[in-house]
Image (cartoon, rainbow, N blue to C red):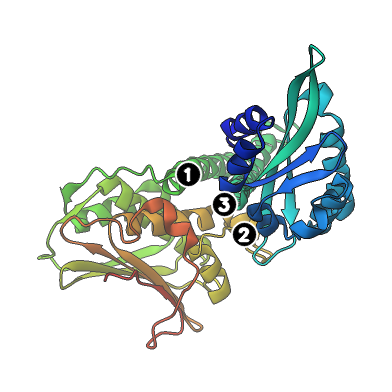
Amino acid sequence: MVSVHTSEQIKQGYSTPDVMQTVLSQSHQGLFVVGANSVVSFCNSHLAELVHIDPLQVVGQSYSVLFNQMANASHNPQRAEARLFAAATNLDALGEQEIRLQLVAAPETHVRIQFFPIHMPVDGQLARVAWGGIVLDVTAEWNETERWNEDLTVLTRGLRSTIANLKGAVTMLLSGHRYWEQSERQTFLESIDEHVDQLNRLLDNAQEMFKLDADTIELERRDTALERLIQRVTQSLVYQKSGHQFVLDIPGDLPNLEIDPLRVEQVFANLLDNAVLFSSREKTVHIKAFQADEEIQVSMTDQSAGMSVEDVNRILEGSLQINTSSAEASRGAEIGLYVARGLILAHGGSIWAESISQTGVITHFTLPIKARASSTGTAGTQRHITTLTPPPSTNGLEIRPNRE
């Protein structure tokens, strides 16, 4: 929030020019003051930097000149100018007000302007003798809000898709248009059961996604045998019903890991969801694990067509929007992939994927044998990784955190 204390200082110091000048010039926020004659009496250098105006052109001029320059720096000058004048006009009736402007700048900037009146006793009555505005760069806050809106949009679409399928199966069962054979009823019930499972996984992943972004993930590490963990996941009823074959290649002498077993189970489940979603029934998923120095590396190979490198790149950067015809059906898997990545990095590991032309996709990830801090410092900053470089030996995409 904009500091109200700053505007109070301005109001109190207005009658003392020396105090006023000190307060305005030392502020780290953009400031302007307009006198009772509607002329701009002051604007500081921070205001000039934020909204790209020339103080020499506005000080001593009508505030309309200032508003015109501020509006011209925005994406929608006509709307911005109308909002600026409305805020100034309504100061007496409504008191302090705030508006936001999106500026045309490189990079794009968002500012919040807090308008405030300055009152002083005049002839025994309190009168407005001036007014001003405090301008604050809120680009980071705006981007955070936009990111949360994107996450909620993706989650909502995923929920709607799953619920629509669930509703369709229930409606068919309840339909009185015909008599359903036992085998047909069984098919509908299995579909309902499958979509309820999808709904539960989507909600679980959504909860983890928001925890990762808020940096509130707490790992409950335990000494865990990876082979037994993988077997629990692949032998679950959900994947047994998928019609896929799961081949495990895991040495019997693999050391135990200091991991959060429930979180790592979720990683495997999310990656398997992707493998099952993008491949036909009766295809084989190979899971291989081996020790590499102080880490265990897991490689999961499936016989799916795979997602494009561009789509994988977008998801691993943190964006969950995919521009393909199958996007509606795959959104839950995209959220799962993002969450898997966050949980692996939270364990201090790394994750990457490579496309194998014509045959499928290999997803690799590593986990440290002994507990290690998050690979990115904090789980909540993972979304902001923007540079992804594939290793020379693959035609896919790799993310390996800098461990200097």
Q: Earlier in the sequence, mark 2 or mark 3?
A: 3
The residue singled out by tag 1 in the image is: 210
* Left or right: 215 in relation to 258: right
The C terminus - image quarter: bottom left
Is the residue marked by circle 2 packed among few (<14), some (14-19), or many (20+) residues within 10 Å?
A: some
Q: Earlier in the sequence, mark 1 or mark 3?
A: 3
Residue 187 vs 352, above or below: the answer is above
Q: Single out the mark in the foreground, 2 or 1.
A: 1
Q: Secondary structure at mark 3?
A: helix
* Name of the residue lying farthest toward the bottom: 392
Amino acid of disc 3: Ala
The alpha-carbon separation of the residues under discs 2 and 3 comes to 21 Å
- Residue 347 percent coordinates (x, y): 28, 55
Q: Single out the mark in the foreground, 1 or 3.
A: 3
The residue singled out by tag 3 in the image is: 140
Q: Does the rendering let one see residue 28? A: no
Label placed on residue 321:
2
Residue toward you, 309 or 318: 318
Amino acid of disc 1: Phe
Proximity of marks 1 and 3: CB atoms separated by less than 8 Å: no
Q: Single out the mark in the foreground, 2 or 3.
A: 3
* Left or right: 255 in relation to 363: left
- At a point 35% along the width and 60% down the height, the residue shown is 376
- Residue 359 percent coordinates (x, y): 47, 80
